[in-house]
Image (cartoon, rainbow, N blue to C red):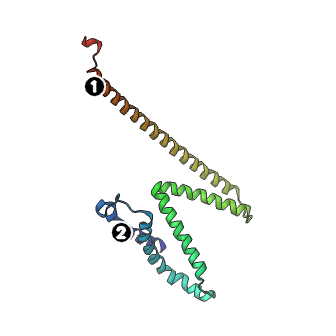
Amino acid sequence: MTILYNDKCIKIVRSVYRPFKSNAHGGDGGLNPITSLYYVAPCCLVFLFIPWIFVEFPLLKETSSFHFDFLIFGTNSFCAFALNLAVFLLVGKTSALTMNVAGVVKDWLLIAFSWSVIKDTVTPINLFGYALAFLGVAYYNHSKLQALKAKDAQKKAQQTDEESGKLLAEKEENNGPIKNDSQN
């Protein structure tokens, strides 16, 4: 049921983003993180409120003495806003894959915290999974670094070619056309 709601939310967000992909609204043809949150947050609220009102709220009403605390609600809201803003900034500056790799690292930190502070058990199968995930992150970082090095080398080669072309053009202007030995 939740997957259906998320699917609908994503479709609505896509239809909202579509006009911003062109330069019709000015700018660079994209949305900044604050504008993205401006459009995404109401969609999320609507599509999460519907299952909450039918599933969570009746249980909350029956089993607890619920009272609204503005301080807790406000700090939680601020933290959620900051998290969403950080996610949009990270994905905007890097890629969604980088966001997923960062999520794996975050999971490692949570597991290490739960093992060291809460004394949660870690089985050999868990350790094998963590090692496999670590190898995946290491390979991703290695591939990313190699791609950056190749891109940097390509830029340097292109700059060298441009400088060589400018030097040749200057030399031809100063000395006239360059003659080969076969032309003499």
Foreground residue among 173 and 7: 173
Indicate the quadrant where residue 28 lies.
bottom left
**Mark 2, residue position:** 16
1 with respect to 31 (left or right)? right
Type of residue at label 2?
Answer: Val
**Mark 1, residue position:** 173
Q: Residue at x 48, y 73 (%)?
A: 2
Type of residue at label 1?
Answer: Glu
Rate crowding at label 2 as few (under 14), some (14 to 19) or many (20 or more) other CA atoms within 10 Å.
some
Q: Secondary structure at mark 1?
A: helix
Foreground residue among 173 and 164: 173
Q: Secondary structure at mark 2?
A: helix
17 with respect to 131 (left or right)? left
87 with respect to 10 (left or right)? right
Q: Residue at x 69, y 62 (%)?
A: 113
Query: Whole-Å distance between the Cαs marked 1 and 2?
Result: 56 Å
Q: Position of residue 1 (x, y in %)?
A: 47, 75
